[in-house]
Image (cartoon, helix red, strand yellow):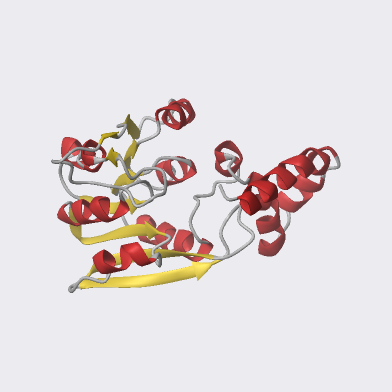
Amino acid sequence: MSGLRTAYVRAVRGTRGIAERSGLLARLGNSASPVLRHVRTLFSIHDVDDLVAQDLAWWSYPAMREVERFLARRADARVFEYGAGASTVWLAKRAARVHSVEHDAEFGRHVAAMVADLPNVELRVVAPTPAGPGSRARSGRAGHEDLAFDDYVDAIEAVGGRFDLIVVDGRARVDSFRRALEHLADDGLIVFDNVRRARYRPAVEAPGLRVRHLRGATPALPYPTTTGLISRG
């Protein structure tokens, strides 16, 4: 994290104990005001368990509302997710089956413990490998330039079939997105978080795709983000 972001996270964590002991967290979380409930989530920065307790995915609120409506119309919805986390549990409450792949082994073990009692979730941890001349899937994230995510991207092949909803919110998002399109149901939907980043645009703006940019407040963050909902046609 950048120095400014690190300082912000430390400051929030430093005040959380006070807010919890004073009852402020409970009052914010139980408020009828969406604004105050969002303020409650600001104390959840990088705390996946706390986001799960509040029944939140880490996307913009407008995107969460749209995805919830989408899944509500599909009783047997089948979901694949690149990048596990709070969204894995959130999706499991709203879809018939969730298949998730995570690249980080330590975080993957944490999420695995969270979903251990959810019979409709299958989580796989597929770590990256050192990149070589034949590597296909790479990440644009700083510090990951020498890693290959081929097996991670191909995890959807191991599950097979088509999916009503596919989430692209992990590493190697461009390659994950392109592979996702091959497994998307005809009337399916792709959730692409942080979709406005310049390195993603050539892929998501390809001909034949419809992209909705849902910008808005986002749990645990003091600024808005944009989650893309992508469909064919």
Residue lying at 38% horizontally and 63% vertically, measured from the top left: 195
The x and y percentages for residue 178 are 20, 56
- The residue under the point 41% across, 46% down is 91
> Which residue is at 24% across, 43% downward?
153
Report x, y in % for residue 186: 17, 61
Lateral position of residue 7 relative to residue 204, left or right? right
**Image quadrant for the C terminus?**
bottom left
21 vs 11, left or right, is: right
Residue 158 appears in which quarter of the rendering?
top left
Q: Is residue 14 above or below residue 232?
A: above
Could you say which is closer to the camera, residue 150 or residue 154?
Answer: 150
Instruction: Tell me where residue 197 appears, x and y as whole percent.
Output: 40, 64
Q: Is residue 106 above or below residue 82?
A: above
Q: Nearer the viewer, residue 21 or 225?
A: 225
Looking at the picture, how far across and down is residue 167, in whole percent? 34, 51
For this view, does 221 lie left or right of residue 201? right
Foreground of the two, 92 or 44: 44
Q: Residue at x 49, y 42 (%)?
A: 86
Number of numbered discs on residues? 0
In the image, farthest residue toward the right:
22
Closest to the observer, 72 or 48:
48
Q: Is residue 73 visible?
A: no
Does residue 144 appear in this view? yes
